[in-house]
Amino acid sequence: MQSKGASADRERVGLENSRSAESHKWLYILIAYYGFEYLRLQDSFFPFLSPLKIPMLLTLILTGYVLVNLKHLQSSKSLFCILIFWILIVSWVPFATNNHHAFQTAKSMSMVFFSCLATILIVDSREKFRIFFNSLTIFLIVLSFWIIYSGGNGPGGFLRDENDAALIMVCALPLVFYRIFHVASRIFRNFLVLGLFSILVAVVVTYSRGGLVGLVAVIGFMIWLSRKRWRNIFVSMLILSLSGGISLALLPQDYVDDMSTITNKEDGTRNLRLLHWTTALEIFKDNPVLGVGPENYPWTSNKYLHLSPYFKEGARFRAGRQAHSLYFTLIPELGLVGIITFFLLIFRHRSNAREIILKTNEAGSRSLAKAIYASLVGFLAAGAFISVLYYPIFWHLIFVGLAFHQIETKYLPSSKTQVWINGRESKKADFNNHSRA
């Protein structure tokens, strides 16, 4: 006969295995959601899936999961900021000039926020984060293949436009680059290397000037994050100066000509952007605290366009169009409350990433923190020229970073802090340890 202890142990192990299988089931549902969100499978690869409304079903399933598990959420300043931002958006629905667009934005942002909350609830261990992150990099690489195949366009939805496709590729670059150095499988590593080059090509084929700015910003920031930054900056500048002519020769001439207009003061696109940006500031002056409501800049700008120094007769026909900037969408539409909340989220993201980079003893964790940090920098740089405030990519990056931080803080050393200073590893004694003089 078997002892009661052995039987109890078997039951306990069986229960743990059952819980593990259950949690992984939800992880794969979450991964499926991200796959449909960024690959737009129902619009691109498998259009016959469109009538099935799979993305909506996955969103509803994840929403139900969040509502059932709300009590397990860890309170944080980031979550508080998200709550304020969501309340601001929803509160505008009955009062905005265009209620329909305000409602549609509130609805889509609510679904995005539920997917974000599901991310930090489900991805709660290193193993799950590894599976999730690897899946995300695969999706982004496959997306780069589609962008190249389609000549610069994304597969659909919020990724259809060339500028939006370029932005998502800029965000993808550090996620793929840093992962290359910490995967065991040679096949997967080679796939990531191929994906890295594919992402760079995808940015070029979009012909997006905002994408080029984001690409330069994210590569520069990745160099700045490196352990021997000054050496790497010098080497990069040397390589750029020696191979600049060769690089330009390899690029399509149309692309070089288009990018050369960035500093052209007579460029029509540049002046139209300046018209909208200065109009956004005029709207903000009249509505500084709460703005005019989500997606309501286009429906308010007609009253303010003539106040812009870039206004010309006939420019009133520009009313009803976006501000063509993340920041000049945020400023007039959500006012100081939205601005403060938005930048608090960014500073919390930066603080969390830096904590892992400076304190962790593990190179893999440090690389992942750098990847998430640099990806957001790429978004913020490229987003300066695109109206992407309500796109899911920003919010997903914030919450992926939050999930990663919650996991990694469990493994941070308590007795010492490892800091990388000028490429050298420095160990600082714990000041709370009074056992040593």
Image (cartoon, rainbow, N blue to C red):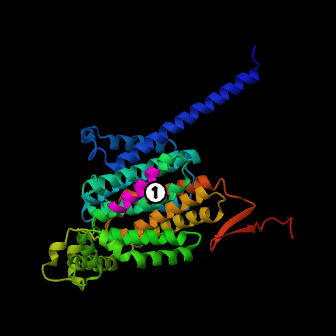
- Residue at the (49%, 68%) spot, across then down: 222
Q: In which quarter of the image is residue 105?
A: bottom left
Q: Is residue 378 left or right of residue 73?
A: left
Residue lying furthest left: 314
Residue 321: give x, y in percent of width and height.
Answer: 22, 68
Indicate whether residue 33 is drawn in magenta.
no
Looking at the rendering, the stretch of residues picked out in magenta corresponds to: 190-201
Mark 1 burial class by Cα count in 10 Å: few <14, some 14-19, many 20+: many
Q: In this view, does 356 lie to the left or right of 133?
A: right
| Residue 388, placed above or below residue 335 | above
For badge 1, the amino acid type reads Val
Quadrant (top left, top right, bottom left, bottom right) of the C terminus: bottom right
Task: Tell which of 190 and 429 is nearer to you.
Answer: 190
**In this figure, which residue is indicated by the disc labeled 1?**
176
Helix, strand or loop at label 1? It is helix
Residue 205: give x, y in percent of width and height.
Answer: 28, 63
Q: Quadrant of residue 213?
A: bottom left
Quadrant (top left, top right, bottom left, bottom right) of the N terminus: top right
Task: Work out whether residue 384 can be spotted.
Answer: no
Residue 392: give x, y in percent of width and height.
Answer: 38, 56
Residue lying furthest top: 1
Task: Tell which of 267 and 310 is nearer to you.
Answer: 267
Q: Quadrant of residue 242?
A: bottom left
**Mainly helix, strand or loop, the magenta region?**
helix
- Residue at the (49%, 36%) spot, across then down: 25
Residue 228: give x, y in percent of width and height.
Answer: 58, 72
Task: Tell which of 313 and 243 is nearer to you.
Answer: 243
- Residue at the (27%, 39%) spot, across then down: 49
- Residue at the (42%, 67%) spot, across then down: 378
